[in-house]
Image: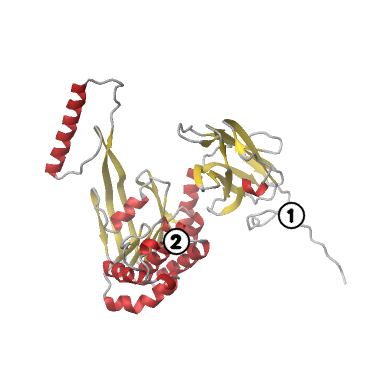
Amino acid sequence: MSDIVIDAENIGKKYTIGHLSERFPYMALRDVWMQNARTVWNKTKDLVKGNPIIQGDTLEEVWALRDVHFKIRHGEAVGIIGRNGAGKSTLLKILSRITEPSTGRVIIDGRVASLLEVGTGFHPELSGRENIYLNGTILGMTRKEIKRKFDAIVDFAEIEQYLDTPVKRYSSGMYVRLAFAVAAHLEPEILVVDEVLAVGDAAFQKKCLGKMGDVTKEGRTVLFVSHNMAAINRLCRSAIWLQKGQVQGTGSTAEIVGDYLADGANCSAQIFFKKSPNAVMQYRSVRVADSKGVTSQYIPDDQEFSIELEIEASRNISDIYFGMILQNQEGINVLFADSRDVAGHLPDRFQTGIYKIDLHLPPVFAPGTYSISLGIATVHPVMQLDNVESACSFEILNNSNEKRTAPRPGFLNLHIPWKLDAH
């Protein structure tokens, strides 16, 4: 008997979207009537033919997935990675039988439990207790099976106090805790988990990763979508990399994550960003400079360097902060810098204009490739103004004269003095 539990053959998913054509500033009333009549006629034809009614004067076909094929074996934990819009969520919806592919087919051997969006399969008016039985039934479990697992689900979700409260009154964190607990404890052969775990706090995320690890040890299959490459590396032995709706690569997690991060980070020490006309404040450029102030992609590990950010405010704005993350080639966050850590160094209010921020970093980083991600957000309320993942990359070079048989382990390359006192 084959140990293949998921066999995807040339999967494609096509969507039709509508666009409003550019209207002239002045139109005769007759032209408006004719255009409206054509719109009504086209929508009536779609309704009669059973086609979806799409808003817009012109239609465009967009392939969210195209020619996707892979096989997943019994008991594997597989990470699905890719940038926003790569088709990850669409693929999971097809694998979960929520939507049908436009082309190709998927053969699945086993019961699938999916956690794709917060509260999927929950009824907001029902209590947590009632939704456990409802969601379990949707997943194909008998009432006896659900009752046997009930206490473990409630204990994992940590919502015993609110068990008889309608879930519409739950916070997003409570929602996802309960949804994950139900999906993970009802013993599906295949567990599909999307990025929704990002809603939970750090302790809950760690708990979920541990549970998914237990699921794979029990011989069941896990598909895990996440932008957290460290979590992917920790949980999954293999990975599928999607890019623009197609499979860019499959293989061992370390290999695929490394290729993904290397591709995502622009291999240049200075990057200029495309300007968004609607942005209140945004990054214009990022530059890596060596100790002499020269733009460089290669930094010796015994020299300090700087990261220079150019920012543009399109209107006066206050109560904002900036963030920067350095990730190594394994996708692990090595450094997080927050402008709120140095209160008083940046103004409380920015006028319309262009600004430059310099970040000076000491020579403490181990040799390797690092990528820079940037963000801007307001403080009250917290709202993201700009976010640039893997804006650019640079490499720390081993400039030490010491001869070593193996590279230094760890993230930081600190030369700490060792003092010996003889007694």
Give how far apart the Cα atoms at labels 2 and 1 are.
42 Å
Q: Is residue 402 visible?
A: yes
Q: What colour scheme was applied to this rendering of the protein?
A: secondary structure
Sequence-wise first label, 2 or 1: 2
Name which residue type carries label 2. Gly
The picture quadrant where one finds residue 271 is: top right
Q: Nearer the viewer, mark 2 or mark 1?
A: 2
Residue 291 at x, y percent in the picture: 71, 38
| SS for callout 1 | loop
Does 147 sit above or below residue 195?
Answer: below
Check disc 1 and report the residue beneath it.
Answer: 415
Does 195 sit above or below residue 313?
Answer: below
Name which residue type carries label 1. His
- Assess disc 1: are there few (<14), some (14-19) or many (≥20) residues with their C-alpha within 10 Å of its C-alpha: few
Residue 282 at x, y percent in the picture: 52, 36
* Total numbered badges shown on the rendered structure: 2
Q: Residue furthest right?
A: 423
Which label belongs to residue 173? 2
User: Is 36 or 215 nearer to us in this picture?
Assistant: 36
User: Is 373 or 44 nearer to us in this picture?
Assistant: 44
> Which quadrant of the rendered structure holds the C terminus?
bottom right
Residue 71 at x, y percent in the picture: 33, 58
> Which quadrant of the rendered structure holds the N terminus?
bottom left
